[in-house]
Structure formats: C-alpha cells, structure tokens
Image: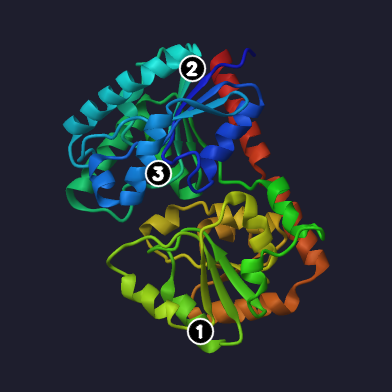
C-alpha cells in the first residue's frame, strides 16, 4: 500500500506531556507516513487565564512550521474564539477558521489526500474539508465526563456528530469503546501502550538513579503524571500518615484547581511526601528506577472510570510493582497489578508488593508490558487503516 500522509489535529502540544498522541504519530512517521501534527488549539480564554500557556503559544506561532523528526512536522495555529463547548455555532466558526489556517501548511508540505486524524470531540466539522482519503477519530478520553448542564449537552452533541462522520473510531478503554460503538460500527478498542524500549532503561544496571530521587530515604513509593483532581487524596494521605518511614514521591506538574486544593495542601504538609516537579520524558526512566513501588492512585469518578492509564504500561515496562485503585483497565492485568478499593487495603497492597517483589516477578511484568507496546498498538491501527483504504 502506498502510505498516505496524515494530518493530525492533536489535543496536546508536541513538547507537552508525552503521551498517546505523540507516541502514535511518531511511530507512523517512522513507518514512512508523512505527518503534519497540529498542536493543541487554545481558546482566547485559556491564553488570558494562563500566562505560561500564552508565552509558549506565542513562541510557537512565531516559529511556524517546524520539522522535529524525519517525516514529521509540527505547527501551532492561532487561538480559537471562546465558548466552543457552550455553543455549536461558535464551534463551527472555530472549525472553519482552523480549516483556513491549516491549508497553507498542507500546500507547503504538498500533503494531498491525507488521513485526517482527530483527537477532540468538537472537530467533526473538519471532516470533508481536506480532500482526505480517510477520517479517524482517536478517542482517548471521555470529554463529557465530570461536566454538567449546557456544557455536557454541547460536548455530547458535538462528539456524536464526529463519531457519526468519522470513517474509523479508535477507543482507548473498554468503557469508551462501549460508549462510542453505538454511533459508529467501525469502532475499535486500542488501549494505551508503553514505549517499552525507553522504559527498559530503568532495568539497565548502567542507568543511574536520578539524583532528585536518589537522595530520598527508601522505600520510595512513587507516582508520575499530572497532580490534580484525578488523584485519590484520601488514599495518599492515609499512606503518608500510617507509614512515615515510606517516602511518597510525586513527579509531574501540579495543576491549579479550586475544589480540592486544600487536599493537596494537606498532603504537602507531611514530611515524608516529596513533590519533585516535572521532568522531560527522556529522564523519566531514571526517576522510575529509583522507585520501589509505583502508584496509580486515581479517584473513582466518572472520568476516571473511562481512563486507560498510560502509566500502567510504562511502570510495568520498567519492571516495577504497581499498586492501583480498582479500575477496569488495571483489573484486566490483575496477574501483575495489586488492586485496592479502600485506603486500608491500599496500604496492605503496597506492603505486600514490597515484601513479594522478586526478579521473577519483575520478568513477568516486563513480559506483560511487551504485549502492550506502542509498536503493537500501531500495528493494529495500521492494519485497520489498510483494510479500510483497500475496501
């Protein structure tokens, strides 16, 4: 099959938190597909609210089109009008602007008849405007979850339009798959994965433990990812309080929010709790190597139930014991993941994981991660796309 180009409208920036969008597009580029990665489009209200985002986006607009890998270019578009999740009309105007702003870059790269790859629920109006050979909606989150009122109704309506128009829908969790399939029979479950080769560095004796974590007392119980309302602070505070001899380590951005900010402040007050901040993806294996146990301490809310936790597979690829709050995706890997549904059980599972860890269990975890690598995930996507194009 002649490999078509890919026009990807991402829900993240290329140099943002490294996740599904970059992992997938990078692998398609390595396989010979020419990829234009359009970075997350911010609304004017976000630029007003977050000065760091405003500075970052302004810098990227000035840089224009930039090649970051062979066959892979990134670009940022101007900001959108505020209110796209509250008005279908405003969203249609925004998508019309997006189409106009994107076309010069397609002409410059001579991207013709691409695969149109969408990540946001409101992007349905883009379908049919790029002479695309195929349209893909890659649904990696339940965007309407934890919303209510008009915003929930609009997001749901926009996403249903996108689902019905897309040629292929990839859903990254079982619950998302079950939720989206009624709107498009060509819906396939493709869970998150791991960059197995990258995280295997944590198993290499030559890889040093990152100095930021090496200075902390063991055992080190760690979490890597966004530090926000998704975490179960009752569980984390219980661990910190009951086991002052354990170091609880958090690596990642601390996002501002209002509802649960006091819970984060309470957690910070414990002397055995350490927030290290955000580190580049290239350094994450050296941080994971310094952790004795890795955590998935997600709160059991609507959004959490739909999640396919990327870190689950990355922790396993590093050979680390994983203790997770009870979750559908973690439950499927119950043979190598310790599950807990209460703070008391979570404490017992962490102690159990520390006590039971062995070289054999480490090999078992890595073997499971290898079955869930990003290479295998993209193999599955490519096969489905090839079949759709040939038919």
Mark 2 vs 3: CB contact within 8 A: no
**Res. 120 visible in picture:** no
Vertical comparison of 185 with 196: above or below: above
Q: Residue at x 57, y 36 (%)?
A: 24
User: Helix, strand or loop at disc 1?
Assistant: loop
Dividing the picture into quarters, in which one does residue 184 lie? Answer: top left
Q: How many marks?
A: 3
Crowding at dot 3, Cα within 10 Å, few <14 / some 14-19 / many 20+, comes out as few
Vertical comparison of 239 with 15: above or below: below
Dividing the picture into quarters, in which one does residue 203 lie? Answer: bottom right
Q: Nearer the viewer, residue 349 or 129?
A: 129
Left or right side of 24 for 258: left
Q: For the C terminus, which image quadrant?
A: top right
**Dot in front, 1 or 2:** 1
**Dot in front, 3 or 1:** 1
Instruction: Please give the residue where the numbered disc 3 appears in the rendered image.
Output: 179
Residue 322: percent from left, percent from top = 63, 66
**Res. 70 visible in picture:** yes
Q: Residue at x 19, y 42 (%)?
A: 86
Residues under labels 2 and 3: Cα distance?
A: 28 Å
Q: Nearer the viewer, residue 189 or 101?
A: 101
Crowding at dot 1, Cα within 10 Å, few <14 / some 14-19 / many 20+, comes out as few
Residue 318: percent from left, percent from top = 70, 58
Instruction: Please give the residue where the numbered disc 1 appears in the rendered image.
Output: 271
Q: Which mark is residue 114?
A: 2
Precedes in sequence: disc 3 or disc 1:
3
Precedes in sequence: disc 1 or disc 2:
2
């Amino acid at each position: 099959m002649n490999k078509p180009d890919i026009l990807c409208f991402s829900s993240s920036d290329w140099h943002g938190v490294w996740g599904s969008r970059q992992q997938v597009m990078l692998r398609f580029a390595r396989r010979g597909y020419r990829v234009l990665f359009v970075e997350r489009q911010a609304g004017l209200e976000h630029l007003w609210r977050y000065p760091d985002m405003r500075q970052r986006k302004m810098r990227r607009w000035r840089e224009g089109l930039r090649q970051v890998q062979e066959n892979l270019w990134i670009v940022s578009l101007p900001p959108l009008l505020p209110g796209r999740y509250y008005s279908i009309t405003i969203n249609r105007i925004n998508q019309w602007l997006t189409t106009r702003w994107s076309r010069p870059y397609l002409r410059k790269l001579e991207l013709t008849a691409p695969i149109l790859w969408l990540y946001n629920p409101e992007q349905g109006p883009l379908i049919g405007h790029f002479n695309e050979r195929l349209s893909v909606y890659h649904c990696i989150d339940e965007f309407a979850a934890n919303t209510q009122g008009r915003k929930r109704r609009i997001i749901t309506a926009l996403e249903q339009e996108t689902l019905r128009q897309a040629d292929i829908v990839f859903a990254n969790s079982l619950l998302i798959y079950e939720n989206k399939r009624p709107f498009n029979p060509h819906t396939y479950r493709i869970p998150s994965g791991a960059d197995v080769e990258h995280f295997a560095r944590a198993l290499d004796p030559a890889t040093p433990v990152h100095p930021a974590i090496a200075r902390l007392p063991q055992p080190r119980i760690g979490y890597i990812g966004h530090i926000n309302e998704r975490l179960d602070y009752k569980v984390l505070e219980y661990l910190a309080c009951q086991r002052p001899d354990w170091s609880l380590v958090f690596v990642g951005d601390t996002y501002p929010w209002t509802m649960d900010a006091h819970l984060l402040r309470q957690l910070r007050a414990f002397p055995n709790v350490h927030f290290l901040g955000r580190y580049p993806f290239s350094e994450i294996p050296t941080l994971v190597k310094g952790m004795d146990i890795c955590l998935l301490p997600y709160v059991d809310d609507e959004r959490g139930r739909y999640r396919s936790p990327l870190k689950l597979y990355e922790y396993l690829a590093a050979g680390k014991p994983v203790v997770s709050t009870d979750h559908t995706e973690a439950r499927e890997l119950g043979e190598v993941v310790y599950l807990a549904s209460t703070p008391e059980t979570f404490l017992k599972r962490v102690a159990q994981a520390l006590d039971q860890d062995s070289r054999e269990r480490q090999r078992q975890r890595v073997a499971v991660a290898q079955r869930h690598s990003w290479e295998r995930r993209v193999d599955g996507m490519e096969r489905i796309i090839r079949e759709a194009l040939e038919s």
